[in-house]
Image: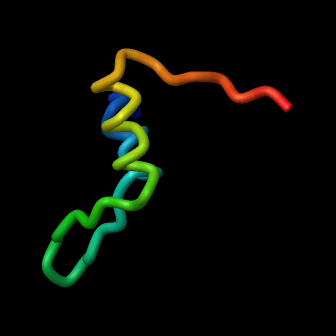
Amino acid sequence: MKYYFPENFQWGLYYTNYETLERIPKKSAFWYHDVIRDNGFERKDG
């Protein structure tokens, strides 16, 4: 069985309501949205 990367990756970004099949974004979805928008993120060491 083959998997499509974005399809698998989204499992960590969205909850799924299996009764309505609604996809509900988690906080990580908004974080990832910002990373894409900003073309990366700043590393915070320490």
Q: Position of residue 35 (x, y in %)?
A: 40, 29
22 relative to 38, above or below = below
Residue 1 shows in this picture: yes
Can residue 2 be seen here? The reply is no
**Number of numbered discs visible in the structure rendering:** 0
Q: Considering depth in this image, is 46 or 26 the residue closer to the camera?
A: 46
Quadrant where the image shows the N terminus? top left
Name the residue: 33% across, 32% down. Answer: 6
Question: Residue 15 at what x, y percent from top left?
Answer: 35, 66
Name the side, left or right, on which 43 lies relative to 19.
right
39 is higher (above) or lower (below) than 15: above
Query: Where does residue 43 sit, x and y in percent of width and height?
Result: 65, 23
Where is residue 34 shown, x and y percent of the image?
Answer: 35, 35
Question: In the image, what residue occupies the spot 40% across and 38% down?
Answer: 32
**Residue at the top extreme?**
39
Camera-side residue: 37 or 18? 37
- Give the image's coloring scheme: rainbow
Q: Nearer the viewer, residue 27 or 1?
A: 27
Q: Residue furthest right?
A: 46
Indicate the quadrant containing the C terminus: top left, top right, bottom left or bottom right: top right
Residue sitting at x 36%, y 16%: 39
Q: Nearer the viewer, residue 9 or 45?
A: 45
